[in-house]
Amino acid sequence: MDIRRKNKKHQQLSILLMLAIVAVAAGCLALFLRSPSSPEAAVTAQPVTDPQALDPNQVEMQDPDSFSPNQEGEFVYTLNATPYFAAGDKAGNLLLLNHGSNEYDMQVDIVLPGETVYQSGVIPAGCQVSEGLLNRPLPKGKYPATALLHILDPMDGEILGELEQPVTLYIATNG
């Protein structure tokens, strides 16, 4: 009788262990396969080490009270690290935000190896560009790219520093 009880207890523990392993595997798979259409913002504070102006209709002002002051020498920005485009010739959800706490303007280029596929123009402090078109349509696919952030003097547009941020462009269908 004692052996049956031990076997049954061992069997129950084995089943619980297998269920736990399956749950962890399912969670990992869900994280791996999550949708790229939800923005994954990259917020970064970096030391600060004549581009075309934006169409005023693309620039959105931010609430100046929503930003805390920067530490001296910091430049704070937000960008979507996984911009999604329904088609290669449609606007994508870029979310390029120059925080209102910054003293400097910024301009963003998104580059693939050997090619600039997006240029934002000047984004003043406290403004953002929510969406934008690529310079040319890209076919359906996933494109590892680099966002080059140019930190600009608001008086003369001189580049004061540059930052690089890895991004991945997602194009859902051919344009």
Image: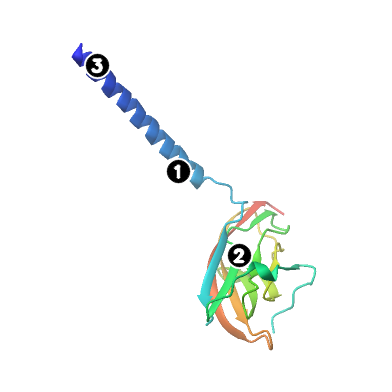
As shown in the figure, which amino acid type bears the numbered disc 2?
Answer: Leu
Q: Secondary structure at mark 2?
A: strand
Q: Quadrant of the N terminus?
A: top left
Q: Quadrant of residue 19?
A: top left
Q: Nearer the viewer, residue 64 or 9?
A: 64
User: Looking at the picture, how far across and down is residue 84, in whole percent?
Assistant: 64, 55
- Disc 3 target residue: 5
Residue 100, percent from left and from top: 65, 73
Tag of residue 63: none
Which residue: 31% across, 27% down? 14
Q: What residue is disc 2 on?
A: 79
Q: Mark 2 or mark 1: name the one nearer the start of the chain.
A: 1
Q: Residues within 10 Å of mark 1 (few under 14, many from 20)?
A: few
Q: Say which residue appears at 69% left-offset and 68% top-offset.
A: 128
Picture mark count = 3
Q: Amino acid at mark 3?
A: Arg
Circle 1: element type: helix
Q: CA distance from mark 3 to mark 2?
A: 59 Å
Identify the element where label 3 is drawn: helix
Q: Mark 1 sits on what residue?
A: 28
Amino acid beneath label 1: Cys
**First in sequence: mark 3 vs mark 2:** 3
Foreground of the two, 68 or 136: 68
Q: What residue is shown at x 70% (from left), y 61% (from top)? A: 137
Can you see residue 120?
yes
Which numbered disc, 1 or 3, marks the residue that appears first in the sequence? 3
Report how far apart the C-alphas of labels 1 and 3 lie in the structure.
Answer: 35 Å
Provide residue 36's location: percent of width, then percent of height.
59, 51
